[in-house]
């Protein structure tokens, strides 16, 4: 994955989030406490399996499908924006610290799993 693709993913995330925030009064429709509970439970499940799994394993991809479904409570990101979200987790200090509190390799593992999910979803629609 080259830098141009990653830049497109970052741009897609920024543009899609800005549009969604503007159209939904800053995601007023989202039950934030529930979202945070659901992501917490999901991240605990991923952390428990991280040391014995690979990002592309079917059971990990099913967990990533749940991650995508939770993200869709805000808006449905394109696959490029979803990869942009993985990049944001890795590049934003607060997000990296938050995710890696579950497991020291969470950001790298989840990022690779999210990219795999996005690539497979894009391939299945083309």
Image (tube, rainbow, N blue to C red):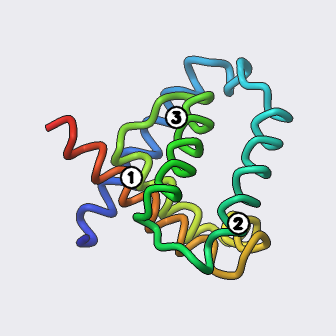
Residue in the image at 63% along x and 72% along y? 106
Marks 2 and 1 sit apart, C-alpha to C-alpha, by: 18 Å
> Which residue is nearer to you in this view: 62 or 84?
62
Give neighbour class at mark 2: few <14, some 14-19, many 20+ (Cα, 10 Å). many
Marks 1 and 3 sit apart, C-alpha to C-alpha, by: 23 Å
Q: Earlier in the sequence, mark 2 or mark 3?
A: 3
Residue in the image at 39% along x and 52% along y? 117
Q: Is 34 situated left or right of 115 in this image? A: right
SS type, badge 1: helix
Q: Which disc, if any, is residue 49?
A: none
Marks 2 and 3 sit apart, C-alpha to C-alpha, by: 23 Å
Which callout, 1 or 3, points to the residue nearer the camera? 1
Give neighbour class at mark 3: few <14, some 14-19, many 20+ (Cα, 10 Å). few
Residue in the image at 21% along x and 40% along y? 124
Q: Position of residue 120 (x, y in %)?
A: 28, 50
Q: Is residue 55 above or below residue 121?
A: below
Task: Residue 4: name its quadrant.
Answer: bottom left
Tags 1 and 3 touching, CB below 8 Å: no
For the N terminus, the image quarter is bottom left
User: Which residue is labeled 1 in the image?
Assistant: 117
Q: Which disc, if any, is residue 99?
A: 2
For the C terminus, the image quarter is top left
Q: Earlier in the sequence, mark 2 or mark 1?
A: 2
Q: Earlier in the sequence, mark 1 or mark 3?
A: 3
Give neighbour class at mark 1: few <14, some 14-19, many 20+ (Cα, 10 Å). many
Residue in the image at 42% along x and 39% along y? 15
Q: Position of residue 54 (x, y in %)?
A: 47, 73
User: Which residue is labeled 3 in the image?
Assistant: 18
């Amino acid at each position: 994955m080259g830098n141009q693709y990653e830049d497109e993913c970052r741009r897609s995330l920024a543009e899609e989030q800005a549009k969604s925030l503007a159209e939904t009064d800053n995601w007023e429709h989202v039950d934030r406490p529930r979202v945070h509970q659901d992501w917490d439970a999901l991240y605990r499940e991923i952390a428990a399996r991280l040391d014995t799994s690979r990002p592309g394993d079917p059971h990990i991809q099913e967990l990533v499908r749940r991650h995508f479904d939770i993200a869709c409570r805000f808006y449905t990101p394109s696959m490029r924006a979803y990869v942009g979200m993985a990049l944001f987790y890795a590049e934003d200090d607060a997000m990296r610290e938050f995710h890696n509190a579950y497991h020291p390799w969470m950001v790298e593992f989840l990022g690779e799993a999210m990219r795999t999910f996005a690539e497979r979803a894009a391939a299945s629609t083309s």
